[in-house]
Amino acid sequence: MIRYNKEQYLQNTVRNVQGKKLWKRLKNLLPHKKVTTKQHVLFNSVIETDEKQIAQKFNVYFVQSIEEIRSNIMANDNIQYILDNIETKGNFETFEIVTMEKIRKIIKSLKVTIELDTLSTTNIVRDCFEVIGNRFLEVLNTSLQKGIFPEQLKTAYVTPVPKIVNSSKCEDSRPINTVSIFEKIFEAEVKDQIVRFCDENEVLVENQSGFRKGHSCEAVILNVCDEWFW
């Protein structure tokens, strides 16, 4: 009974409200996290204590790190050889149309989280989905068919988490991204379709275990042991 009344209250709160007023109401429904920041961080041998400068320099550092990783991957001769010689049974030309039932299944599978962005808690989206579901499904399918990702969903809150205790060096922190739940739904659907295509068309080699459902480190160890000892 309490659950039902809560859902009705949330749906009535956002029903027939659009634009900035909708986001403002949703923001008021969400609890707020207390965010802590480092007092000082070392960037290229220079100690920075200003919070805004620390945030800005962390942004620059993480973006540059990603660009460096990308360039190293594309410059790898082995990667290029694989890309040039890979054989598949088909080509991934377009994404499939997503159904409302599929979106409900994805939302149901998401972990319950409280995030920094507006309209980001899983419970809020679940409770309001009967009101906003059709509009979101339209945005999702349009985005997949046209290959254009909404600009509003490209923003993420990045929290530097130390890899080494009590270290002040920027390179000793790893970025933890907090994104909108809508971005997570996009990501889950894109991943599902691409992984399904790779499995059906045998894009990945049989012994590939990383980031694959039903595979593990134990499977890799068994395959290696089979090659070594048999």
Image (tube, rainbow, N blue to C red):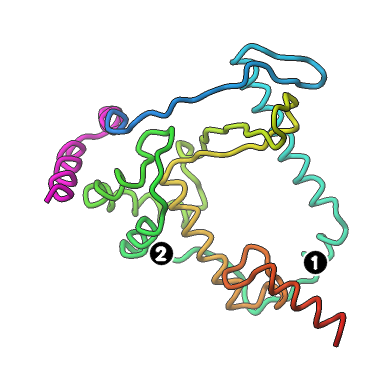
With respect to residue 164, does 35 lie above or below? Answer: above
Residue shown at the point (86%, 84%) measured from the top left: 229
The magenta region covers 1-25
Residue shown at the point (85%, 54%) measured from the top left: 76
Main SS, magenta residues: helix
Q: Which residue lies furthest to the front in this view?
A: 165
- The kind of residue on which mark 2 rests is Ile
With respect to residue 30, does 200 lie above or below? Answer: below
215 with respect to 190 (left or right):
right
The circle on residue 82 is: 1
10 Å crowding of disc 2: few (<14), some (14-19), many (20+): few
Residue shown at the point (82%, 47%) measured from the top left: 72
| Position of residue 110 measured from the top left corner of the image (x, y, whole percent) | 41, 54
| Position of residue 4 measured from the top left corner of the image (x, y, whole percent) | 14, 50
| Position of residue 146 measured from the top left corner of the image (x, y, whole percent) | 48, 53
Image-quadrant location for residue 124: top left
Residue holding disc 2: 97
Q: Contact (CB < 8 A) between labels 1 and 2?
A: no
- Magenta highlight on residue 10: yes
Disc 1 from disc 2: Cα separation: 30 Å
For the residues carrying marks 1 and 2, which lies nearer the camera in this image? 1
- The kind of residue on which mark 1 rests is Ile
SS class, disc 2: loop
Nearest the eye: 78 or 29: 29
Look at the image and tell me in which quarter the C terminus lies.
Answer: bottom right
